[in-house]
Image: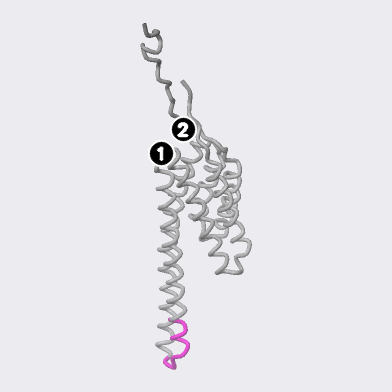
């Protein structure tokens, strides 16, 4: 009677590369478009890694939770960008008007759109990182790498505190722990299922006469 072991080296490498790309995107955040693309690629690579591990372990929860994080994270970003574009449009419209009332209305509308977009995006980001935390907590259990749990918690707390500077710092530290977690991830995992050897049949034990 023994436990089977499964190889997850490919998933580990994908997750590590994805986490590093996210950190690089933060470092070059002054190039906003390129940084956003790098970050998205990194998150998708991590999702593929989690997807592979989930399938290998036959537990859909890690990949399902991370997929929710990925989808909500994208929607959160789109909502904020849409609000920002609409606000810019309102400001441009207000700046070319010669009516003081319309000018004030345009500025107020722009501010209101930004606030609403930020609130919606902020709430969705918190929910998204909560599901990321749930996914990483499961990976922590399976891989016995505590850094997964730490990374998920820091991302979640960072999202909550994002309205102040410490939130962004916590997310950055969470990304560093994310890299450490994937780098520390073992090449093989125990499935937790015991494989019992089939006992020999009576014909195999007793010689045929």
Residue 1 position within the rendered picture, expressed as x and y whole percent measured from the top left: 46, 20
> Quadrant where the C terminus lies?
top left
Q: Residue furthest bottom?
A: 98
Seen at 41% across and 62% down, the residue is 75
Seen at 56% across and 61% down, the residue is 38
| Magenta-highlighted residues | 90-99
Residue 30 position within the rendered picture, expressed as x and y whole percent measured from the top left: 61, 68
Task: Residue 118: say if magenta.
Answer: no
- Left or right, 72 with reference to 23: left
Q: Is residue 76 above or below residue 11?
A: below
Dominant secondary structure of the residues highlighted in magenta in the image: helix
Residue placed most toward the observer, 133 or 62: 62
- Left or right, 164 with reference to 71: right
Task: Residue 92: say if magenta.
Answer: yes
| Mark pair 2, 1: CA separation | 9 Å
- SS for callout 2: strand
**Residue at the spot of label 1:** 58
Q: Is residue 197 above or below residue 53?
A: above
**Residue at the spot of label 2:** 191
Residue 12 position within the rendered picture, expressed as x and y whole percent measured from the top left: 55, 44
């Amino acid at each position: 009677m023994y436990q089977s072991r499964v190889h997850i080296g490919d998933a580990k490498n994908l997750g590590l590369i994805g986490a590093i790309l996210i950190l690089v995107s933060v470092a070059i955040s002054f190039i906003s478009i390129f940084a956003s693309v790098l970050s998205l690629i990194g998150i998708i690579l991590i999702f593929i890694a989690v997807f592979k591990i989930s399938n290998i372990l036959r537990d859909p929860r890690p990949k399902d939770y991370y997929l929710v994080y990925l989808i909500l994270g994208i929607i959160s970003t789109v909502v904020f960008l849409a609000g920002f574009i609409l606000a810019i449009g309102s400001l441009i419209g207000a700046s070319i008007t010669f009516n003081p009332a319309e000018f004030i209305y345009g500025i107020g509308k722009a501010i209101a759109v930004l606030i609403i977009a930020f609130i919606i995006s902020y709430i969705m980001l918190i929910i998204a990182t909560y599901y990321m935390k749930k996914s990483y907590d499961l990976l922590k259990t399976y891989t016995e790498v505590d850094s997964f749990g730490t990374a998920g918690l820091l991302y979640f707390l960072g999202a909550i505190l994002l309205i102040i500077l410490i939130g962004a710092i916590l997310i950055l530290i969470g990304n560093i722990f994310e890299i450490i977690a994937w780098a520390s991830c073992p090449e093989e995992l125990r499935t937790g299922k015991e494989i019992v050897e089939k006992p020999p049949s009576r014909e195999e034990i007793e010689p045929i006469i």
